[in-house]
Image: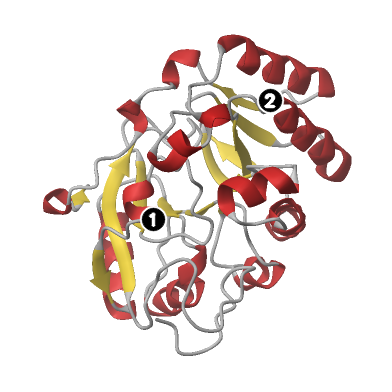
Amino acid sequence: MLNNYCNNCPRHCKSASFCGKEKNKIRIAKVMRHKFEEPLLCPELLGSGAVFFSHCSLKCVFCQNYQISHLGVGKDFNVKELAGIFEKVEKSGVANLNLVTPTHYTGDILKAFYIYKPSIPVIWNTSGYEDESVILSLKGYVDIFLFDVKYFDKNLSMKYSKAPDYFEKCIKALKLAREIIGDDLVLDGQMKKGIIIRHLVLPGHYGDSIEIFKYIKKELGTDVYISIMSQYVPFYKANEFPEINRKIKPIEYKKVVKEIRKLGFNKGFVQDISSANCEYTPEFNLKKFFEL
């Protein structure tokens, strides 16, 4: 339970937290050498040093990581211990420190950085549901934003994530992140500084995907790295929503990619339709908490 006002995400919880976190506890589900992020973030021999934070401020009904986002699987740490984890990740020889779904722990993460700030690039791997104030607080600490843009239509974001203001908050935060980071910097195939906009195509909603990128073109232009994912699998409570209780069809994904290319986006990544399986979902087994 939260005993006071929390401003880590747009929900601004005043009592019990929507995300599920508890005061003075930082819950983490796994720390691993991740090799399935975008290629610019995961050099084959190094991988990305992923820290998977438990709980989530969005809690999508179809979340592939529902064990940690909805069910809260993980181990509890304090700020000093979190700083120690950051140092351990850096010393393991990975390409970067990848903070996965970190938003609801922003204050604790910044305190940990005061204790130990890694010299490798830091990735803010976010659902996109962010306050501008949080993004501003990350200036000087975060080098790369791996920024989900999940929905354009507020009816969809309400239905699947209980966040009718999702796109409004997401696009404002994304524009501010672009201002803070400046130009992308990629050296020898590795992103050192920059933004990657990531979008998961949902079954039956490919039109919403296209609207997202029309708006991004208008607000940020097309000179930005994007990642269009076909890996949707109907996890957790997706079976309660018949329209998303299936994998996407190849024709749906092809339509999205075709329209995005027509808009002028040519920097980034697409997936093979065979990516829609469980291979890319980490195993959250606390007996294998550290896999570096």
The image's colour scheme reads: secondary structure
Q: Is residue 146 visible?
A: no
Q: Amino acid at mark 1?
A: His
In screen coordinates, is 118 left or right of 132?
left
Compared to 184, does 25 lie above or below?
A: below
Cβ atoms at labels 2 and 1 below 8 Å apart: no
Q: Which residue is tagged 2?
A: 206
Q: Badge 2: how crowded within 10 Å, few (<14), some, or many (20+)?
A: some
Compared to 14, does 65 lie above or below?
A: above
Instruction: Say which of 289 and 34 sits in front.
Output: 289
Dot 2 falls on a residue whose secondary structure is: helix
Upstream in the sequence, badge 2 or badge 1?
1
Q: Which quadrant holds the N terminus?
A: bottom left
Instruction: Say which of 131 and 265 sits in front.
Output: 131
Residue 56 lies, in percent from the top left, at 46, 59
Q: Is residue 18 visible?
A: yes
In screen coordinates, is 205 left or right of 16?
right
Which residue does the image show at 49% across and 15% down from the upper left?
A: 273
Residue at the left extreme? 287
Dot 1 falls on a residue whose secondary structure is: loop
Q: How many numbered circles are shown?
A: 2
Residue 23 lies, in percent from the top left, at 38, 82
Q: Which residue is tagged 1?
A: 70
Residue at the top extreme? 251
Residue 281 lies, in percent from the top left, at 34, 35
Which residue does the image show at 74% across and 48% down from the upper left?
A: 154
Which residue does the image show at 70% across and 15% down from the upper left?
A: 255
Residue at the right extreme? 218
Label 2 vs label 1: CA separation? 26 Å
Q: Badge 1: how crowded within 10 Å, few (<14), some, or many (20+)?
A: many
Q: Amino acid at mark 2?
A: Tyr
Residue 200 lies, in percent from the top left, at 57, 33
